[in-house]
Every structure is written in structure tokens, then in C-alpha cells.
Amino acid sequence: MQMLLDMEMESSLRLSFGEYIVIMLLRPLLAIGFVLSLISLGWLLAWKLVLVHVPLVQEVFGLKKKPVRTKPQTGRLSKIYSSIHAQNSSST
């Protein structure tokens, strides 16, 4: 009787080929996929909420083009130089 119970217990502990495939291949692949999806979701949230607004990241990835602006001529010296430049242009 004891031998029969031992054989039944041993046969119930053995894994079938399908269960072996699930344990050895499918579960690790699902775990890796889950971790990669969490990392991707975290990166996406960080990108959308924080990193897009950092000037260094904008410059590296070319997200924001800085418009080239000339400085307005409001100072005393700039008026003098512009009048000299205008005189030189008209005399030549």
C-alpha cells in the first residue's frame, strides 16, 4: 500500500513536457517582457513630463531650434556706429 502511494505521489510531481516548456521558457520571457514594459513606460512618462523641458536635452535631440535674433540698437554707441556706417555707405 505504501509503495502505491509513493508511486502516485512521484507521478504527480513529475512535469509534463508542456509544463516544462511553460516553466523554463514562457515564464522567464513573460517576466522579461513585463520588466521591459515597465521600464519603457517609466521612460515615456519621464520624457513627456520632465525631460522635454530640460534645455540640454532639447539641444541634444534637436527639439527646439533657437531663433537667431539681432540685438536691437538701443545703446548710445550702437547709434554712433550705425550713423558712421551709414555715412561710409553713402560716400562709397
Image (cartoon, rainbow, N blue to C red):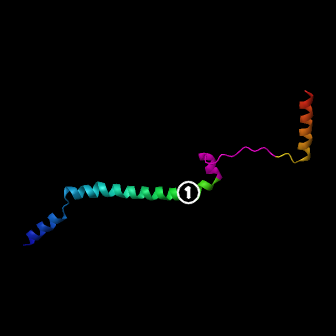
Point 92% across, 33% down: residue: 87
Image quadrant containing the C terminus: top right
Q: Nearer the viewer, residue 75 or 51?
A: 75
Relative placement, left or right, of 1 versus 21 is left
Looking at the rendered structure, the kind of residue marked 1 is: Lys
Q: Outermost residue, bottom direction?
A: 1
Q: At which x and y percent is residue 52?
A: 59, 54
Name the residue nearer the viewer: 69 or 90: 90
Q: Residue at x 51, y 56 (%)?
A: 44
Q: Is residue 38 left or right of residue 46?
A: left
| Residue 4 in picture, x, y percent from top left | 8, 69
Question: Element under label 1?
Answer: helix
Q: Among all residues in the image, which is located at the extreme top?
A: 92
Is residue 67 rendered to the left or right of residue 44? right
Please name the residue shown 54% across and 58% down the image. 46
Q: Is 70 colored magenta in this rendering?
A: yes
Q: Classify residue 2 by image quadrant.
A: bottom left
Q: Nearer the viewer, residue 39 or 13?
A: 39
- Callout 1: few (<14), some (14-19), or many (20+) C-alpha neighbours within 10 Å? few
Residue placed most toward the observer, 57 or 67: 67
Write the start and end of the magenta stretch as one range: 55-71
Q: Total of numbered circles in the picture? A: 1
Question: Relative to 72, is 66 on the left or the right?
Answer: left
Quadrant occupied by the N terminus: bottom left
Q: Which residue is mark 1?
A: 48
Q: Residue at x 19, y 58 (%)?
A: 16
Q: Tell which residue pokes out farthest to the left in this image.
A: 1
Task: Return the x and y of residue 75 as percentages of the image width and height.
Answer: 89, 47
